[in-house]
């Protein structure tokens, strides 16, 4: 009996030793690395997500899935995310599945790499803000900071600069598209990201920048027709406004200038002898500081129409307010005009006249549209609008049907209808 107990005790000891050995010597194989990522990836499962209904009075379909989020210490937290896909009453289940698919594609496309040793994107952005941002236009910096704060840094801020590849950026774009960003918005964010990395390459931090040409962006949605005035509406707006706004509307509509450029005009920019208006600066709407115009081609001399010249001479003689900066248009205390207040004044006038609401840019859009409608060559319109390329002019005002185009289709119609008689 004693021998039997001794043997059982030895067997238990051997089994316990074997289990301990297996546990201590077990090797867990990491998931295979993605191309261009030297660090091992945490093993991930392909997500299919699930859809549930939520709510009592107004039931909605909610898609649920998991999203990898990197912590500052380099560990990855798998967070639960939910998105509302529509109401149960209006969205069929199959349509809800299709609506959830872009979100799943974004998280299934590529694994998030662990941060490598070295400078992260977040660190580089701080350096960029100190050394590069002060040299750029305030509006450019504001747009870049918005893209960084809202989209780029939350998704890629903790990645090292060398870990940002074309494949990672494609996953980032897919995630933006899943959030509902348009193709134009995605392209703007990409421009900020690629600009940062080009600077990083110039400073020797990265050997190359991701290839934008191979990235797949969201499809173009239905373009909303940009609101603009007709010549008849502008005449009514000018006639119904008191000075200084009446002349301000006239300058905006007859030159096609941007609002900031008109707010920055000085008396010395009016050359009545040569009959030109010199565009040399623009007023930043947020800081109300003067800066160079939007682009190199924006700085130009524009012809001064005879009727506008007479109106400006009358304005300077009877309504102009003297101010320290010698501005053509200023507020009551002699400072540059506030864009938002001018826009509100325009909306009040439009409401009184029964004209549909439109922004200040509608004057510029009207000028280009009227010239194209009257058969002016696109190259001439380009010079007046001061676009760097005539293709920009054609893209912006392609909806305008000019006289030459009307004559062409009328001729085609006569030919076809005569053939069908």
Image (cartoon, helix red, strand yellow):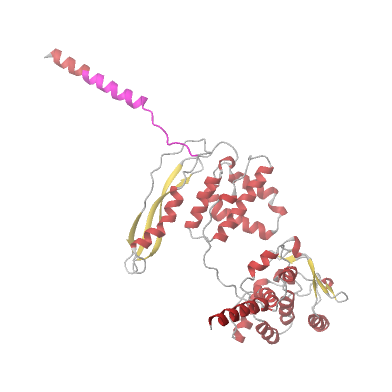
- Side of 69 where 244 appears, left or right: right
Q: Nearer the viewer, residue 420 or 23?
A: 420
Q: Up-down: is 181 above or below 122?
A: below
Q: Quadrant of residue 160?
A: top right
Q: Residue at x 60, y 40 (%)?
A: 119
Q: Residue at x 35, y 61 (%)?
A: 94
Residue 376 is situated, as x and y percent measured from the top left of the image, at 72, 75
Q: Up-down: is 381 above or below 136?
A: below
Magenta residues, as a range? Answer: 11-34
Quadrant (top left/top right/bottom left/bottom right) for the N terminus? top left
Most distant residue in the top direction = 3
Most distant residue in the left direction = 1
Residue 411 is situated, as x and y percent measured from the top left of the image, at 63, 79
Q: Residue at x 37, y 62 (%)?
A: 95
Q: Up-down: is 367 above or below 214?
A: below
- Side of 83 where 411 appears, left or right: right
Residue 349 is at least partly visible in this image? yes
Q: Quadrant of residue 313?
A: bottom right
Q: Is residue 33 magenta?
A: yes
Q: Is residue 291 magenta?
A: no
- Side of 303 where 118 appears, left or right: left
- Side of 270 where 250 appears, left or right: left
Residue 420 is situated, as x and y percent measured from the top left of the image, at 53, 81
Residue 10 is situated, as x and y percent measured from the top left of the image, at 22, 16
Q: Up-down: is 421 above or below 68?
A: below
Q: Nearer the viewer, residue 16 or 204?
A: 204
Numbered-mark total:
0
Residue 291 is at least partly visible in this image? no
Q: Main secondary structure of the magenta part?
A: helix
Q: Residue at x 29, y 25 (%)?
A: 19
């Amino acid at each position: 009996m004693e021998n039997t107990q001794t043997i059982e005790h030895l067997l238990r000891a051997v089994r316990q030793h074997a289990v301990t050995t297996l546990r201590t010597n077990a090797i867990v194989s990491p998931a295979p690395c993605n191309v261009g990522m030297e660090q091992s990836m945490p093993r991930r499962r392909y997500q299919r997500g699930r859809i549930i209904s939520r709510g009592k009075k107004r039931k909605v379909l909610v898609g649920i899935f998991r999203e990898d989020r990197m912590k500052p210490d380099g560990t990855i937290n798998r967070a639960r995310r939910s998105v509302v896909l529509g109401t149960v009453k209006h969205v069929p289940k199959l349509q809800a599945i299709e609506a959830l698919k872009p979100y799943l594609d974004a998280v299934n496309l590529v694994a998030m790499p662990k941060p490598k040793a070295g400078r992260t994107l977040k660190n580089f952005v701080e350096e960029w803000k100190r050394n590069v941002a002060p040299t750029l236009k305030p509006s450019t910096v504001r747009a870049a900071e918005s893209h960084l704060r809202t989209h780029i840094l939350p998704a890629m801020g903790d990645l090292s600069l060398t870990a940002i590849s074309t494949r990672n950026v494609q996953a980032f774009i897919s995630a933006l598209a899943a959030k509902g960003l348009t193709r134009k918005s995605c392209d703007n964010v990409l421009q900020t990201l690629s600009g940062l990395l080009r600077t990083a390459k110039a400073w020797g931090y990265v050997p190359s920048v991701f290839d934008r040409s191979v990235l797949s962006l969201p499809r173009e949605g239905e373009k909303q027709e940009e609101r603009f005035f007709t010549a008849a509406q502008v005449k009514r707006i000018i006639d119904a406004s008191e000075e200084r706004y009446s002349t301000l509307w006239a300058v905006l509509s007859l030159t096609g200038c941007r609002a900031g450029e008109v707010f920055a005009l000085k008396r010395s920019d009016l050359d009545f002898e040569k009959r030109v208006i010199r565009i040399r600066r623009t007023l930043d709407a947020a800081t109300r500081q003067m800066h160079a115009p939007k682009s190199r081609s924006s700085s130009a001399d524009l012809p001064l129409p005879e009727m506008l010249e007479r109106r400006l001479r009358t304005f300077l003689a009877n309504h102009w307010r003297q101010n320290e900066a010698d501005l053509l248009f200023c507020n009551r205390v002699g400072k540059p005009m506030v864009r938002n207040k001018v826009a509100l004044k325009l909306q009040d006038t439009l409401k009184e006249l029964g004209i549909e609401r439109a922004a200040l840019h509608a004057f510029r859009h009207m000028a280009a549209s009227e010239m194209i409608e009257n058969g002016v060559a696109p190259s001439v319109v380009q010079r007046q609008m001061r676009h760097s390329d005539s293709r920009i002019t054609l893209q912006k005002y392609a909806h305008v049907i000019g006289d030459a185009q009307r004559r062409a289709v009328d001729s085609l119609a006569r030919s076809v209808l005569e053939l069908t008689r």
